[in-house]
């Protein structure tokens, strides 16, 4: 199926134009959606739906390429930064820039997942951990989590908040 810009709504095209004007700044997606005319109610869901829309993504990709931000260019730049040497210490890696480049790359591919977790503190829930969960946690952390082996296979835990 071929992509046609006319398949997008006026708001979707306006959102993409505003996003391109922001140099595709991920932190400005909600702001761009609001300026494009989307309702502030559930703006997070709106942006999420825009991100999942194949036609929207195709036009974003075209706009990025118009600005010279092709995938090859981005990969080459990331590689260049990851291999960079420290400006003051010849032959030593520039660990600060390398860390920032990796962080940017991970953000681009959304490797970090959601950054925000909403917790409803007025709602109390019972959490049940199996003994295998504790053993796995101990194995991962390398620390002892419980002092004695419980007699039952499940342990009830109440949240601390």
Image (tube, rainbow, N blue to C red):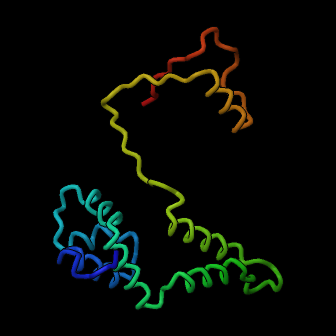
Report x, y in % for residue 11. Answer: 19, 74
Report x, y in % for residue 120. Answer: 33, 36
What is the count of numbered marks? 0
**Residue 98: which quarter of the image?**
bottom right
Q: Is residue 151 left or right of residue 88?
A: left
**Image position of 151 with respect to 142: above or below:** above
Please tell me which residue is depicted at 64% across the width and 76% down the height of the picture: 97
Q: Is residue 8 left or right of residue 68?
A: left
Q: Nearer the viewer, residue 10 or 34?
A: 10
Please tell me which residue is depicted at 56% across the width and 16% down the height of the picture: 154
Q: Nearer the viewer, residue 74 or 28?
A: 74
**Image position of 112 with respect to 131: above or below:** below
Report x, y in % for residue 121. Answer: 34, 33
Q: Quadrant of the C terminus?
A: top left
Please tell me which residue is depicted at 52% across the width and 57% down the height of the picture: 112
**Image position of 156 with respect to 97: above or below:** above
């Amino acid at each position: 199926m071929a992509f046609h810009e006319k398949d997008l709504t006026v708001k979707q095209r306006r959102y993409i134009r505003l996003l391109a004007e922001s140099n595709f700044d991920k932190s400005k997606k909600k702001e761009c959606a609001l300026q494009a005319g989307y309702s502030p109610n559930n703006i997070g869901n709106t942006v999420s739906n825009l991100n999942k829309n194949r036609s929207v993504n195709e036009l974003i990709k075209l706009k990025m390429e118009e600005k010279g931000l092709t995938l090859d260019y981005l990969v080459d730049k990331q590689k260049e930064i990851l291999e960079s040497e420290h400006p003051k210490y010849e032959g030593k890696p520039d660990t600060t820039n390398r860390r920032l480049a990796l962080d940017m790359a991970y953000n681009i591919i959304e490797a970090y997942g959601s950054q925000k977790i909403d917790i409803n503190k007025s709602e109390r829930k019972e959490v049940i951990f199996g003994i295998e969960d504790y053993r796995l946690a101990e194995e991962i952390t390398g620390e002892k989590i419980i002092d004695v082996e419980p007699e039952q296979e499940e342990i009830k835990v109440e949240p601390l908040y």
